[in-house]
Image (cartoon, grey):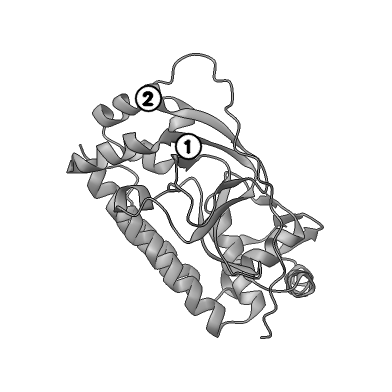
Amino acid sequence: MSVAPARKRVSTKKPARTHHPGPLLPGSSEIKLNKLLSALPDADLKRWLPHLELVDLPLGCVLYESGEDEGHAYFPTSGIVSLLYVMKNGDSAEIAVVGNEGLVGISLFMGGNTTPSRAVVQSAGHGFRLKAQLLKDAFKLGGPVMNLLLRYTQALITQMAQTAVCNRHHTLDEQLCRWLLLSLDRLPGNELTMTQELISNMLGVRREGVTEAALKIQASGLISYTRGRIKVLDRAGLEKRYCECYDVVKLEYDRLLPREMAA
């Protein structure tokens, strides 16, 4: 496969706080939409509730840039964030996606505070943000919160490693199938709305390559593809077409991040 990344253009606007009517409660539907927040022991979640802000995550919004101090951690609920490595010439490629299963900002509690990657919203939605220091303080206390965050980090590292393998050894339509399934696992529905340019930058290929791969999958009746919108029509069929990389990542997330976590 010939790889020729396009130069990425993204919005620089920051996520805006969304008005939230009334206090957040431990059992609130908003909190439960993020699996990490939902898995927190009640005592830890209660300490975070006054500090969690519900924010808009608009398409193309940059949550942080390479080498930039991260002031907040983000817990997506309905949006998806892409972690990208950006070259000096502006070319970029995706190394991982984060949605309602996790958080953006692992460098905060791993001790680095910054990262060479860029975090960009690839599918618009909402999420919660928490000030960096509060996340650091919770991690330093150890116990269930630290264990949960470390297990999530291991799952995310697996996704990064498998993405590198997939990009090297599998065809573009296999990569697109893997990417679609990983994204769908992090969304409440079966449709992704995003620009063709963003998709091409996520996969690190020309837009023409994305169009060709998407139309090939559409011809099989598995997806409906129009400019800026992909709807999965036959997930079972899509799962038969993807490479082994999706299963490796999904199994590791399922193993490390159970639905419930004992206090």
Identify the residue under disc 2. 49
Give coordinates of residue 263: x percent, y percent. 20, 36
* Residue at the farthest top position: 22
Name which residue lies at 73% across and 70% down: 210
Residue that appears at 52% across and 54% down = 185
Answer yes or no: is residue 135 visible. Answer: yes
Q: Nearer the viewer, residue 243 or 152?
A: 152
Compared with residue 262, is residue 121 higher up or lower down, i.e. above or below?
below
Q: The residue under label 2 is which amino acid type? A: Leu
Q: Determine the secondary structure under disc 1.
A: loop
Residue 240, picture quadrant: bottom right
In the rendered view of the protein, which quadrant contains the N terminus?
bottom right
The residue to which callout 1 is attached is 33
Instruction: Give the vertical position of 159 relative to 30 (above or below).
Output: below
- Crowding at dot 2, Cα within 10 Å, few <14 / some 14-19 / many 20+, comes out as some
147 left or right, relative to 91: left
Pick whichever of labels 1 and 2 is earlier in the sequence. Answer: 1
Q: Position of residue 116 (x, y in %)?
A: 47, 61
Residue nearest the viewer, comparing 242 with 75:
75
> Can residue 237 be seen by looking at this rendering?
no
Residues 207 and 38: in front is: 207
